Image (tube, rainbow, N blue to C red):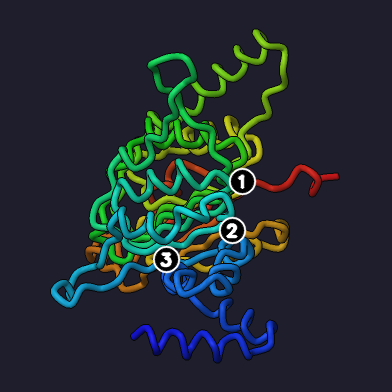
């Protein structure tokens, strides 16, 4: 085996740098982490920060577990990422556990875009990210650099026990967060509780601003798409847009199955680009509702009515950019 690697290394050294670079760009993070162990030249290429800025992570499928979703083991993930944590800006990862999500959020300090696809169960613990305060034996919420967070189940049986309290705190911990998408999974967020958390965080930020005389910018959230609608009313929708002045797109879409980029809502709102669920048209409604319940409606937040919240399977609410009226 050592002779094989020695021969391969010698052949590798003869290749032009441009060809070597193309080869390295085609490798996934698992292969890159293995390749760096061959020799110094391989390590130099494998450790290049450019190769680690935007990565996709798929766990190895066990031959004894072919029918179930393979999940990452924390030790295996650390072996791949540990040397490159500060370079990572975008991650798409399949098959996570709570400790995997915690590790990524707490250690990838420059992470801006996280997409999680597939899990067995995600609990609140996955998103309770704290750091230890200096000189004190206490913990405090960590401030994260995330701009986009997407939780996309691979099947609707994927369960997310992420409650509104943790969800609200997570939004507060991510001052630059512009997009949250949670679809294709089972999640239950109480609208009233979520609003209370967001409102509380806004009030605490205002008090902090008064005490320390510094400007606290409003929530950066522009797009929120979640696979729930059971507890939402017209009041909740309107209030959320008030609390998040930058919010332009709200999707309450329990039937969503996958995500594509959606540009524009109508001719008056073409500037919006948001994650739009592809809706599951195979969903069976009972005979009483099948003829009367629209599959999807889109409404301006200023025109939405309570009965429309109830009379649609999926609801997209948008808010026009103020510049549109100028």
Residue 77, visible in the rendered structure: yes
In space, the residues marked 1 and 2 are separated at their CA atoms by 9 Å
Q: Earlier in the sequence, mark 3 or mark 2?
A: 3
Does the CB distance between marks 1 and 2 fall below 8 Å? Answer: yes
Q: Quadrant of the N terminus?
A: bottom left
Tag 1 residue: 222
Q: Residues within 10 Å of mark 1 (few under 14, many from 20)?
A: many
Residue under the image location 47 percent in, 67 percent down: 56
Badge 2 marks a residue whose secondary structure is: strand
Where does the image place residue 320, in percent across and percent down from the top left?
A: 69, 48
- The quadrant holding residue 78 is bottom left
Badge 1 marks a residue whose secondary structure is: loop
Residue under the image location 38 percent in, 16 percent down: 137
Where does the image place residue 144, in percent across and percent down from the top left?
A: 54, 38
Badge 3 marks a residue whose secondary structure is: strand
In space, the residues marked 1 and 3 are separated at their CA atoms by 27 Å
Q: Quadrant of the C terminus?
A: top right
Tag 3 residue: 57
């Amino acid at each position: 085996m050592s002779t094989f690697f020695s021969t391969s290394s010698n052949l590798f050294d003869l290749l032009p740098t441009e060809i070597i670079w193309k080869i390295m760009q085609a490798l996934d993070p698992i292969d890159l982490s293995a390749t760096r162990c061959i020799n110094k030249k391989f390590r130099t290429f494998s450790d290049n920060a450019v190769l680690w800025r935007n990565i996709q992570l798929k766990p190895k499928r066990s031959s004894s577990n072919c029918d179930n979703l393979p999940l990452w083991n924390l030790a295996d993930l650390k072996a791949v990422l540990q040397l490159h944590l500060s370079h990572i800006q975008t991650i798409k990862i399949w098959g996570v556990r709570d400790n995997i999500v915690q590790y990524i959020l707490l250690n990838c300090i420059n992470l801006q875009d996280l997409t999680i696809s597939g899990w067995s169960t995600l609990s609140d613990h996955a998103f309770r990210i704290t750091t230890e305060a200096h000189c004190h034996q206490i913990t405090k919420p960590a401030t994260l650099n995330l701009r986009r967070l997407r939780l996309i189940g691979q099947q609707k049986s994927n369960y997310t026990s992420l409650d509104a309290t943790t969800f609200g705190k997570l939004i507060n911990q991510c001052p630059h967060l512009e997009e949250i998408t949670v679809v294709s999974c089972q999640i239950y967020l109480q609208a009233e509780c979520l609003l209370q958390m967001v409102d509380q965080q806004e009030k605490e930020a205002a008090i902090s601003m008064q005490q320390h005389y510094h400007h606290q910018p409003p929530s950066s959230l522009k797009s929120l798409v979640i696979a729930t609608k059971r507890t939402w009313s017209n009041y909740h929708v309107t209030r959320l847009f008030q609390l998040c002045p930058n919010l332009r797109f709200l999707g309450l879409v329990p039937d969503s199955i996958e995500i594509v980029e959606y540009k524009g809502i109508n001719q008056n709102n073409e500037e919006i680009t948001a994650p739009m669920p592809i809706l599951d048209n195979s969903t069976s409604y009972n005979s009483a509702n099948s003829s009367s319940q629209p599959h999807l409606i889109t409404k301006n937040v200023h025109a939405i009515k309570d009965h429309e919240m109830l009379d649609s399977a999926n609801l997209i609410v948008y808010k026009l950019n103020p510049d549109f009226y100028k």
